[in-house]
């Protein structure tokens, strides 16, 4: 009788230990790390993943796509402070902060223009874009020239009003493109100083 009681207690103890082990191991992900994706959407931007904190496991692929609420604007994305286009994919191998915002080209730019003809005349100057909104305004450069700019639907146009009819066109995101003026043409690019 005593032996039967000890066996019963031992069996209950073993069953309890097995249940505890199953509970412990059942809640574990067996060494696959979880990472957090913190998404920040600034005003004027919509898309997926939505704003907030999301959980992913190691090497999960994350597809993202953001668009401006106003279709005249352009969106840029920063993944851990590295600038990206508004649509793409990345793998989770660490926790990530993703921020999507509207491109704002206002401010100073170091401009370089290269003529495509054989004169090899190049221009290098600083241009400052001003405006009440993100889609248009006025500008001046450090040589004293002025004009108007527009940035709509991902395209930028910079039109000089007092420098030999120079017109620069290109992309808002990359701030580069082509120009015409003074009876010639070429390419341009701009970077923040």
Image (cartoon, helix red, strand yellow):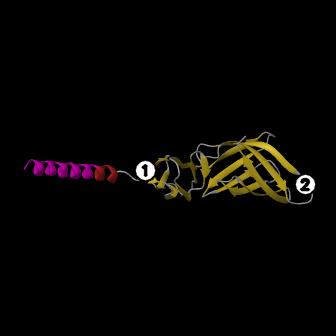
Magenta-span inclusion, residue 163 = no
Q: Secondary structure at mark 1?
A: strand
- Image quarter where the C terminus lies is top right
Residue shown at the point (72%, 52%) measured from the top left: 158
Q: Secondary structure at mark 2?
A: loop
Per the rendering, the mark at residue 120 is 2
The percent coordinates of residue 192 (x first, y second) are: 70, 43
Residue shown at the point (64%, 44%) measured from the top left: 106
Q: Nearer the viewer, residue 158 or 19?
A: 19
Q: State the predominant SS element of the stretch in magenta.
A: helix
The percent coordinates of residue 93 (x first, y second) are: 53, 52
Mark 1 and mark 2: Cα distance apart in space: 53 Å
Residue bearing the label numbered 1: 54
Query: Could you tell whether 88 is left or right of 170 in the image?
Result: left
Query: Could you tell whether 102 is left or right of 17 in the image?
Result: right
Residue shown at the point (81%, 51%) measured from the top left: 113
The percent coordinates of residue 3 (x first, y second) are: 12, 49
Label located before the other in sequence (1 or 2): 1
Q: Nearer the viewer, residue 47 or 151?
A: 47
- Quarter where residue 141 is shown: top right
Residue shown at the point (70%, 49%) measured from the top left: 148
The percent coordinates of residue 115 (x first, y second) are: 85, 56
Query: Could you tell whether 83 is left or right of 160 in the image?
Result: left
Magenta stretch, residue numbers: 1-20
Per the rendering, the mark at residue 40 is none
* Mark 1 crowd level (few <14, some 14–19, many ≥20, 10 Å Cα): some
Q: Nearer the viewer, residue 89 or 29?
A: 29
* Residue at the outermost right position: 119
């Amino acid at each position: 009788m005593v032996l039967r009681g000890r066996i019963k207690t031992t069996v209950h103890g073993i069953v309890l230990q097995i249940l505890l082990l199953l509970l412990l191991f059942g809640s574990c992900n067996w060494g696959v790390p979880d990472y957090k994706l913190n998404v920040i959407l600034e005003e004027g931007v919509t898309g997926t993943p939505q704003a907030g904190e999301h959980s992913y496991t190691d090497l999960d692929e994350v597809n993202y796509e953001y668009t401006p609420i106003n279709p005249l604007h352009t969106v840029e994305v920063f993944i851990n402070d590295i600038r990206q286009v508004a649509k793409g994919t990345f793998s989770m191998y660490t926790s990530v902060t993703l921020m999507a915002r509207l491109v704002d080209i206002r401010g100073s730019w170091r401009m370089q223009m290269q003529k495509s003809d054989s004169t090899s005349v190049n221009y290098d100057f600083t241009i400052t874009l001003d405006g009440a909104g993100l889609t248009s305004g006025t500008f001046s450069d450090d040589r004293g020239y002025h004009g108007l700019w527009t940035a709509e639907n991902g395209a930028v146009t910079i039109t000089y009003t007092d420098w030999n009819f120079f017109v620069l066109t290109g992309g808002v995101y990359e701030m580069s493109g082509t120009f015409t003026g003074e009876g010639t043409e070429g390419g341009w690019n701009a970077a923040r100083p």
